[in-house]
């Protein structure tokens, strides 16, 4: 069996408690666009599949039939501006200990700005080598595929919170 070298974290709900905060932000998007996602449980069911695909589907069902991209932009802007959370108590120590042995990567439906702000505020940004976010790679499955296809992602930390992941060009 190969030695474990890399750990992937889903930021929201794993090292960061996000349920109430993410629902409160999404509630504003829901009200603006009339998406019919009127309860926290309905919101969290969107995560049973790819969140952005589920959000795009709901966008076509609103009274005004908003453009999915407008809905996505609105929610992501709220995340960029107003999403301020702390790590679960004790998680910073866990992250620091793991970073000493493994390459750590974040996968999140959140935005790069919000993830960077949270990691910096909690003094763990330097522990993560790469961050894949919903505004860069909306599908976590695609992000995992990119990670698996490129062995350089497991080559350690840059010790810098300046993540430079980008969406690969799609063939035409």
Image (spheres, helix red, strand yellow):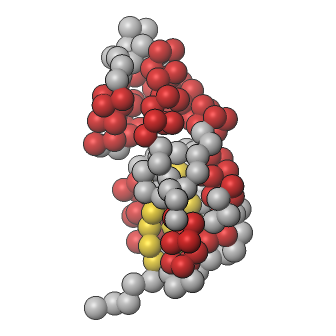
Give coordinates of residue 145: x percent, y percent.
39, 64
Residue at image position (44%, 73%) is 7
| Res 125 → quadrant | bottom right
Residue sitting nearer the eye, 62 or 108: 108
Residue 21 image point, x, y percent: 51, 36
x 45%, y 63%: residue: 9
Q: Is residue 126 visible?
A: yes
Comparing 144 with 47, the one in front is 47
Which residue is farthest front? Answer: 89
Q: Please provide percent x and percent y for residue 60.
A: 36, 19
Q: Is residue 101 above or below residue 104?
A: below
Q: Is residue 104 left or right of residue 44?
A: right
Residue sitting nearer the eye, 114 or 146 = 114
Of all residues shown, which one is farthest toward the top? Answer: 63
Point out residue 118 in the picture as x, y percentages from the top left corner: 63, 52
Task: Report the side of 103 relative to 4 (left or right).
Answer: right
Image label count: 0
| Residue 59, above or below 137 | above
Q: Visible in this render: residue 137?
A: no
The front one of 114 and 20 is 20
Quarter of the figure that contains the N terminus: bottom left
Q: Residue at x 58, y 51 (%)?
A: 86
* Residue drawn at x 63%, y 66% as measured from the top left: 124
Residue 54, above or below 97:
above
């Amino acid at each position: 069996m190969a030695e474990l070298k890399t750990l992937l974290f889903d930021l929201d709900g794993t090292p960061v408690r996000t349920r109430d905060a993410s629902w409160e932000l999404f509630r504003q998007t829901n009200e603006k666009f009339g998406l019919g996602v009127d309860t926290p449980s309905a919101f969290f069911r969107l995560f049973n599949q790819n969140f952005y695909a589920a959000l795009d589907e709901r966008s076509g069902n609103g009274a005004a039939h908003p453009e999915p991209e407008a809905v996505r932009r609105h929610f992501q802007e709220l995340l960029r501006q107003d999403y301020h959370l702390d790590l679960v108590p004790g998680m910073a120590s866990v992250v620091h200990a793991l970073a000493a042995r493994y390459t750590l990567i974040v996968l999140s439906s959140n935005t790069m700005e919000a993830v960077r702000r949270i990691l910096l505020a909690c003094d763990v940004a330097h522990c993560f080598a790469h961050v894949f976010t919903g505004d860069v790679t909306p599908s976590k499955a695609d992000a995992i595929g990119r990670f698996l296809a490129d062995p350089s992602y497991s080559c350690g930390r840059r010790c810098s919170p300046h993540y430079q992941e980008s969406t690969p060009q799609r063939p035409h």
